[in-house]
Amino acid sequence: MTSHVREKAVEPFSDVHLEKGHVRATLLHDPTVEGLDMAMYMDGSASMGDEYEYKKKFGSLMGWLFNKPAEMLPNRVEPQVQRMLEYLATKDRNGLLRVAYWACGTGARIEVIGELKGIDVQSYKFPGPKNPGASTLLEPALRDYVQYLKEQVPNGARRGCAVFVTDGEIHDADKVKKFCTQTVKEMLAGKLPRLNFILVGVGDQVDEEQLEEICHEEYPGFGHLWCHRLAEEMTQIAELVAVLVDETMTVAAGGTIYDDKGNVLKLYEARLPAILEFNVPEGCKSFTLEVNGQRYTQPLPEDDDHHDDDEDDDDHH
């Protein structure tokens, strides 16, 4: 059996397979939004209490007779946050997302959960904040994210996007508008990277008129800072957020794959998928992905043809 050399994946790729001239390259992050630093803020106000509550699943009569502990079901927020995290991390420059509860305590406190990875998301629990909030104040959460983004600039952050989920009325809309005006001024002056905010309202207590007022504001020299959507149910949130982020963050959609001689192998006119699949000519040593005028060249590994274990890997999507 010939020796097998696996080429080191070059960013933005995390893994590259070659089998019978067919390449399967997995993207570590989406290079159409190079340098994007994402964050997710979940409403921590007391009105969200029900959504964060874990429910007991009642077992069988036999289980009850033999004192078998009741199984706990995930709360309604947890699976949605896990799904959002998994997706948004593919957009983030290092695959880590700042995740926090906002509107905690007096309504102005932020409880930061941490910098969470987009892999193994099932291991994360989201039981709600330690101190549910008495009111829903959004400006402190915006301030928290902008400060965080400033700190990330020396580490490579070149763009920002924060998602805020709420189930009620915002109690500091005027302060939010003032802060946004100031933030746009800082961006236009080059003191802050370009950023966007996404606001998702869930349930029937949301003041839609207020959300529209905040989000439809146009800032001279910049345009819209916000976009928003309403979800009737918590279970719709992950899908909505994915669509909004795609709409908001796509600078120039798609990309082009070239072989080592500069021939076009594949053209992605819409969005880049997370896994790129294409064929290369015999003897091709590398391929190049071009996105937004940036080029990323990835050397090809030896053909995986003789390796059953790798063929198995190739079947996994």
Image (cartoon, rainbow, N blue to C red):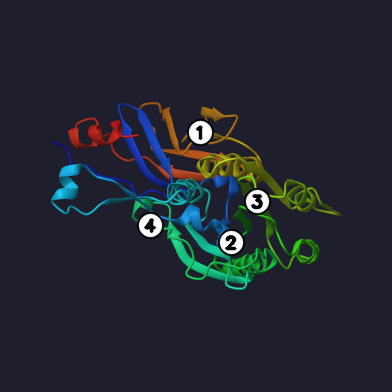
Marks 3 and 2, how far apart at CA: 18 Å
| Image location of residue 250, percent across then percent down | 64, 42
Verify CB contact (< 8 Å) between mark 3 and mark 1. Answer: no
Camera-side mark, 3 or 2: 3
Camera-side mark, 1 or 2: 2
Residue at disc 4, secondary structure: loop
Counting residues from the N terminus, which is met first, the one under dot 3 or under dot 4?
A: 4
Marks 1 and 2, how far apart at CA: 28 Å
Residue at disc 2, secondary structure: loop
> Would residue 313 be found to the left or right of residue 10 on screen?
left
The C terminus lies in quadrant = top left
Circle 1 residues within 10 Å: few <14, some 14–19, many ≥20? some
Per the image, the residue denoted by label 4 is 124
Per the image, the residue denoted by label 3 is 198
Q: Which residue lies furthest to the right in this view?
A: 220
Verify CB contact (< 8 Å) between mark 2 and mark 4. Answer: no
The amino acid marked with disc number 4 is Tyr
The amino acid marked with disc number 2 is Ala
Counting residues from the N terminus, which is met first, the one under dot 1 or under dot 2?
A: 2
Circle 2 residues within 10 Å: few <14, some 14–19, many ≥20? many
Counting residues from the N terminus, which is met first, the one under dot 2 or under dot 4?
A: 4
Per the image, the residue denoted by label 2 is 157
Per the image, the residue denoted by label 1 is 258
| Image location of residue 150, percent across then percent down | 63, 69
Counting residues from the N terminus, which is met first, the one under dot 1 or under dot 4?
A: 4
Residue at disc 3, secondary structure: strand
Verify CB contact (< 8 Å) between mark 1 and mark 2. Answer: no
Q: In this orientation, does residue 292 appear?
A: no
The amino acid marked with disc number 1 is Tyr
